[in-house]
Amino acid sequence: MKAWRALFPVLALGLAGCADSGAPSGDDVVARAAGVEFKAETAAEILAPQPQLPADTAVVRILADLWVQYFLLAKTSSEDSTLANLDVTSLVERQIQGEMVSGLRDRVIQVDTAVSDVELRARFEAELPGGRLRARHILLQFPVGASPAQADSVRALAEELRSRIQSGEDFEAIARDYSQDTQTASNGGDLGSFGRNEMFPQFEEAAFALDEGELSDVVETTLGLHLIRVDERVIPDFEERRDQFRAQLRNRIVMEAESVYVANLVEAAQIEADSAGFESVRLLAAAPDLALTPRALDRSLVRYEGGVLTLEEFREWLLTNPADMAVQVSGASDEQLNGLLHNLTRSELLVNDAKAKGVEVPQDRIDALTSEILDGVKTVAQGLGFFEITREEGESSDEAADRVVRGILAEVVQGEREVIHLQTIAFTLKEQYGARIFGPGLGHAVTRINELRLQPTETVDPTLPEAAGDTVTADTSGGQG
């Protein structure tokens, strides 16, 4: 199950605004959501009193995006406490696709997981799950850029040392004289105790095949050539671990069958990523809120038998993942991007295959998923106090929501309130209402932060209407009023 889940991208908190048409009213606008603007002055007043936060566009962007998320949730919550106005179709669809993939697995993976006691014991003794060894080794490394003759010389020395040990010479003495493992040579090659998956696969396979006191053949890893001697074997009791090992073996059989099925599906699809689109992917990752034309979004990044993966699909995936994902993608190599796009395409292939095989999610389950998502959103909105927003005299509902959110952000920045992440709902809110973050406004906010930090100590209330523009300067003279 986990193997298939891992192939299906999971939505998470996105820290970038979605495209929204139109230009801001000025360079002092940091963000806009549902037609309401978040000004650079407001962002600066919230951040300036916190000198531990650098005056940096990245910090302002995070604050602006949090404003977008909170404001849109406050807006939709204050308009209708049932959240009937919130379109969660895309979120439900993602959940449905995940369950379709699980249903596909149950339908197509039919393998015999019965394991006899004889076979079980044989596999247990071969793998020794939970077993540990205490061993020593001698390492001989190849010179950098070794010629074939030099490599042959190192191998000949390894065979010679092995013969000497078999003839009765002391392993530990030879390790001290010849081993190039500087951490263990002085201790006679002592590696201490280790278990499975703690050494190079070739090393581990050879070591666990040895009995106590037995010397290995020459073993090659990326480090060089090894001679291994096992001093002690701590073997787990088969009877104690029988049931646990049987369950693990059955899971492994199923996972291996899953891997074969997915591999065959991928091979038949003939996936081919277009390396010419890699730069577009990096540029999008560097500026996820960049407004793109429909033609640009329709660009094909990957072609496969029966379909394509477009830049728009990749953009949605990027915006619904943690912010550090965009940073990783923007700096990824061509090889890494190729692997990422192949993984996303494999997920798409699994969903398509599930649809082709008639895998469906019952309507009552879809209704339950919808209710679960809405209940989760309601819990977050309740925790932020968005259902209790009341308008002050002369305020519109949007102005009231903005005022409350600015107050929350000030408390977050001051460390007086924990950040409540909106996770997947943030993307849906942005798509439904429209939202965008503006680069020039970020820079303007940074300038104002630096200016405010150079001024005499001020007390500002970021929840006041921006039009008022009032600040109260503290009297630091110590005199009487």
Image (tube, helix red, strand yellow):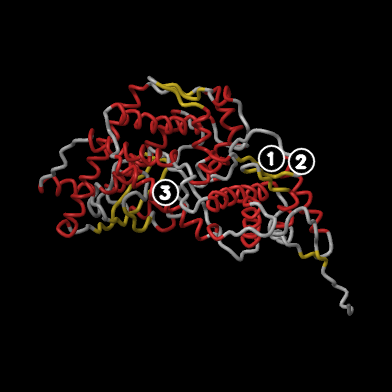
Q: Which mark is residue 27?
A: 2
Of callouts 1 and 3, the N-terminal one: 3
142, above or below 410, in the image: above
**Which class describes the residues within 10 Å of circle 1: few (<14), some (14-19), or many (20+)?**
many
Query: Image quadrant of residue 223?
Result: top left
Of callouts 1 and 2, the N-terminal one: 2
Query: Image quadrant of residue 263?
Result: top left
Q: Are marks 1 and 2 in contact (CB under 8 Å)?
A: yes
Nearest to viewer (mark 2 / mark 3): 3
**Which class describes the residues within 10 Å of circle 2: few (<14), some (14-19), or many (20+)?**
some
- Could you tell me residue 469's position as x and y percent? 80, 56
**Which class describes the residues within 10 Å of circle 3: few (<14), some (14-19), or many (20+)?**
some
Q: In whole angstroms, how far apart are the C-alphas of marks 1 and 3?
A: 30 Å
Assign the N terminus to one quadrant of the image: top left
Tag 3 secondary structure: helix
- In the rendered structure, which amino acid carries the disc numbered 3? Ile
Badge count? 3
- Residue at x 27% of width, y 55% of height: 130
Q: Which mark is residue 373?
A: 3
Tag 2 secondary structure: loop
337, above or below 5, in the image: above
The answer to whether 149 appears left or right of 387 in the picture is: left
Give the residue at mark 1. 438
Q: In whole angstroms, how far apart are the C-alphas of marks 2 and 3?
A: 37 Å
